[in-house]
Image: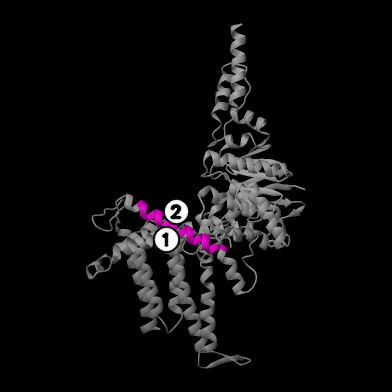
Amino acid sequence: MSIKVCNVSYVYHRDTPLETVSLRDVSFDVDPGEWIAVVGHTGSGKTTLAQMLNGLLFPTSGEVVVDGLKLYPKAPHLKSLRRKVGLVFQYPEHQLFAETVLDEMMYAPKNFGIPEDEARRNIEKTLELFDLDENVLSKNPFELSGGQRRKVALASIMVVEPDYLVLDEPTAGLDWKGREALFSILEDFRTKGTAIVQITHDIEMVLDHCDKLLVLENGRKKLWGTPAEAIEELAEKPVKGLVLPEVLEFAHSLRNAGLNVPLTWDEKSLLEAIEREVSSCIS
Amino acid sequence: MHFLEHLSLGQYVPAKSFIHSLDPRSKVLAVMFLITSVFLANTTLWPYVIWFVLIVIISSLSNISFKTVVTSTRPVLILIVFTLAINLFFADGRELFRIAFISITEEGLLTGIKMGLRLFYLVLFANITMMTTSPIELSDGIESLLSPFKRYGLPAHEFAMMMTIALRFIPTLLDETDRIMKAQLARGADLDSGGIIKRFKALIPVLVPLFVIVFQRAEELAVAMEARCYRGDYGRSRMRPLMWGVCDSLYLSAILFISASGVILDRWIL
């Protein structure tokens, strides 16, 4: 059970003067319970890749296989695969349309043919996870605050309990508090076995959470590995448009200056290492 | 469903070419001349051959392949075929042959072809012009062409500004629609099956967010324009003033000559 992306390429406006290649020959796997971060600059093809994972776009060449089933246009299993792979677009609150939060949350379960009582139970569970009050259900989503709207939008996707959750820049426009809250919710999902694919331009934000990093540059796979492996390489060969954590940059320059410190993005461990180095120098 | 997959009708294709470099006014006038003459000719088919050659030549001067120009007119092809069919089946005249109760007449066939070709040329030529003129140039051109009517109370500038804004937001809104549709598809929406009523109901989750976004954007744009002291036409200068050159005069007179000769040929010679 996994998502396999094999040698996927994608071309927009094919055979027209505006033809642009968005992805070239990208491959990677998503296993259950894994947290994968897809990192890249604007135009690196990360959003295109996200839309391929649940059959909203189909690769020009190569293939995407979800739990052993290949995705292709008009596939009979497309809808059931879309239930398995939840996709959260950037600014998901823009897709709210219903008159009440309850209707909004019932939309996906209805579409996927989930019985009403089961859907109800799921809604209760999801509300709890998102720390939303029961009485929010009767409210109009447009009356809610920005942060709550984001939560409701995410919850309305999560109620169908997808096995994989793909999120395109889920923290865009959120403050630090909202971001931390979102990450703790995502960590909850991960411990329950949901795989998470997070798409972002901000590498610093995901380093502490993800198991593996996929770095894209102009539609090509630049890097694929654990955060520790990835930063090692990124510090040596920076990718255009990708800003590394300041702490990491600092650790890298210290290293280049001949200090024996680990390449880390964690302030505390870097400080400890520096202290050790300094005290050993003095003694 | 995927708006971005194909080049849409009249979408501007930035390139460097003779046609791209012309003044938008000459291009707009050329379209008007050719279309008027296409609708004036109605006896024989010969002028249509001349005009076709003309359109092919213009398209080759525009650095956009003729195939691209034709394929992007696909959305109106149904209309053209429909026009042809209507004329073919419902015109009186000398019967050519008969299939069951439908009689095909010579007159019907001829008018059908002519009407179809007229529409086709209209769309084709307008399409080449739109593909080679940026929306901003186009509305500047139209504003300038309409400005003589200002003294009769025609709000030429406001009209052009409305057009610019509308044109400017078409791609943005298409993108937005595409995104919302995909977002709802990801939530299991079924947008292209079932009867008309079911389909319309399925569109509500797309239309409501789209309207919300449109109003938001309109509001933001209005504030941004106010903040930059936009006050209409009054005292407004241009970053790129329109320049009528020798090429424009040449282009326009060539088009005028060829389209007029088509009409003269049709009316008085053939």
Quadrant location of the C terminus of chain A in the rendered image? top right
Q: Mark 1 points at which residue?
A: B167
Secondary structure beneath label 1: helix
State the image quarter where residue A12 is shown: bottom right
Q: Left or right: B227 with respect to B120?
A: left
Q: Mark 2 points at which residue?
A: B15
The span from disc 1 to disc 2 (Cα, nearest Å) is 19 Å
Amino acid found under the numbered disc labelled 1: Leu
Going 62% across and 57% down the picture, which residue do you hit?
A: A105
Question: Which is more toward the observer, B127 or A28?
Answer: A28
Q: Position of residue A31 (x, y in %)?
A: 74, 43
Categorize mark 1 by other alpha carbons within 10 Å: few (<14), some (14-19), many (20+).
Answer: some
Q: Mark 1 lies on which chain?
A: B
Going 48% across and 76% down the picture, which residue do you hit?
A: B117
Going 59% across and 7% down the picture, which residue do you hit?
A: A282
Q: Residues in magenta?
A: B205-224
Q: Are marks 1 and 2 in contact (CB under 8 Å)?
A: no
Q: Are marks 1 and 2 on the same chain?
A: yes
